[in-house]
C-alpha cells in the first residue's frame, strides 16, 4: 500500500481538511434591495444640509443631477463597504461636474429622492435625483466659445461730455446756418452714441443624465 493510501486509511478526513485549509470568507454580499436603499439613504443623509439652512437658502441657485445603478449589476456582487464607496463617489462626481461649469459656487446637497425604477434601457435600477444648492448664491457663469462671457457697457455720451459742451458753444456763436445744422447733427450723434456690447451666452451642456457613467 502506498504511503498516501496508508495515510488516508488512518485519517480519512485529513485529506479533505488539507484541501480546504486556508480558505477565508470575505464580507457577505448584499442580496436585499432594502439593504441597498437603506445604506444609500444613510450616505445621502450624511451629506444633506439641515432643514433650517434649506429654508434660508430656498431662493438660492440650484442644480439637479441624477444617477442610476441597475440592480442586476449590484445584487449578490458587492458588499456594504463597496456600495457605500460607490454612493459617496457618485455624489463627489456630481459636484465635480457642476464645478466644471460653475466653479464660483459652493455646492451643498439640499434635497434628494431615491427609488427603484426602470432606467432608460428598461432595467430595474436604483435611481437617485439630487438637488444641489450654491451656498454662495453666486451668479451663473455663461460661456462664449469656452470663455466666460462678459457684459461691457460703454457710455459715449459721458465720455464726450466736454466735447459736446465745446461744440454747443461753437454752434451758438456761428453765423453760418449750414454749419450750425451740421454741428447740431454731430452733437446729437455724439450725445446719443451709447454702445452696449453683450456676448450672447451659449446654452450650457446638460449633464443631468450623468447617471450613464455610474452604472454598477
Image (spheres, rainbow, N blue to C red):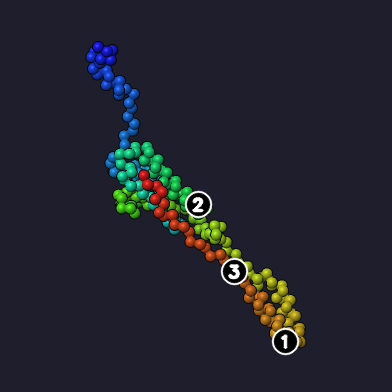
x and y percentages locating residue 16 in the rendered image:
27, 21
Name the residue carrying label 1: 178
Q: Is residue 67 left or right of residue 7?
A: right
Name the residue carrying label 2: 100
Name the residue carrying label 3: 196
Q: Quadrant of the C terminus?
A: top left
Q: Is residue 42 left or right of residue 11?
A: right
Report the front residue among 117 and 37. 117
Instruction: Count how many numbered circles sit on residues in the image.
Output: 3
Q: Can residue 54 be seen here?
A: no
Q: Nearer the viewer, mark 2 or mark 3?
A: 2
x and y percentages locating residue 62 in the rendered image:
44, 56
Q: Residue furthest front?
A: 1
**CA gap, disc 2 and disc 1:** 61 Å
In the image, is residue 109 above or below residue 160?
A: above
Q: Residue 155 sits in which quadrant?
A: bottom right
x and y percentages locating residue 187 in the rendered image:
68, 78
Amino acid at each position: 500500500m502506498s504511503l498516501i493510501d496508508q495515510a488516508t486509511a488512518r485519517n480519512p478526513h485529513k485529506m479533505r481538511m488539507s484541501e480546504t485549509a486556508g480558505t477565508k470568507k470575505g464580507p457577505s454580499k448584499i442580496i436585499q434591495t432594502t439593504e441597498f436603499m437603506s445604506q444609500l439613504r444613510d450616505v445621502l443623509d450624511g451629506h444633506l444640509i439641515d432643514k433650517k439652512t434649506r429654508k434660508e437658502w430656498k431662493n438660492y441657485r440650484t442644480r439637479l443631477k441624477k444617477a442610476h445603478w441597475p440592480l442586476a449589476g449590484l445584487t449578490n456582487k458587492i458588499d456594504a463597504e463597496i456600495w457605500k464607496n460607490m454612493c459617496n463617489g457618485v455624489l463627489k462626481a456630481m459636484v465635480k461636474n457642476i464645478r466644471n461649469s460653475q466653479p464660483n459656487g459652493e455646492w451643498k446637497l439640499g434635497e434628494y429622492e431615491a427609488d427603484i425604477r426602470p432606467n432608460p434601457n428598461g432595467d430595474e435600477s436604483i435611481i437617485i435625483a439630487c438637488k444641489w444648492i450654491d451656498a454662495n448664491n453666486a451668479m451663473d457663469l455663461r460661456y462664449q466659445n469656452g470663455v466666460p462671457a462678459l457684459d461691457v457697457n460703454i457710455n459715449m455720451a459721458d465720455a464726450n461730455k466736454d466735447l459736446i459742451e465745446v461744440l454747443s458753444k461753437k454752434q451758438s456763436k456761428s453765423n453760418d446756418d449750414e454749419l450750425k445744422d451740421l454741428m447740431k447733427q454731430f452733437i446729437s450723434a455724439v450725445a446719443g452714441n451709447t454702445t452696449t456690447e453683450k456676448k450672447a451666452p451659449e446654452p450650457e451642456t446638460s449633464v443631468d443624465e450623468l447617471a450613464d457613467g455610474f452604472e454598477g
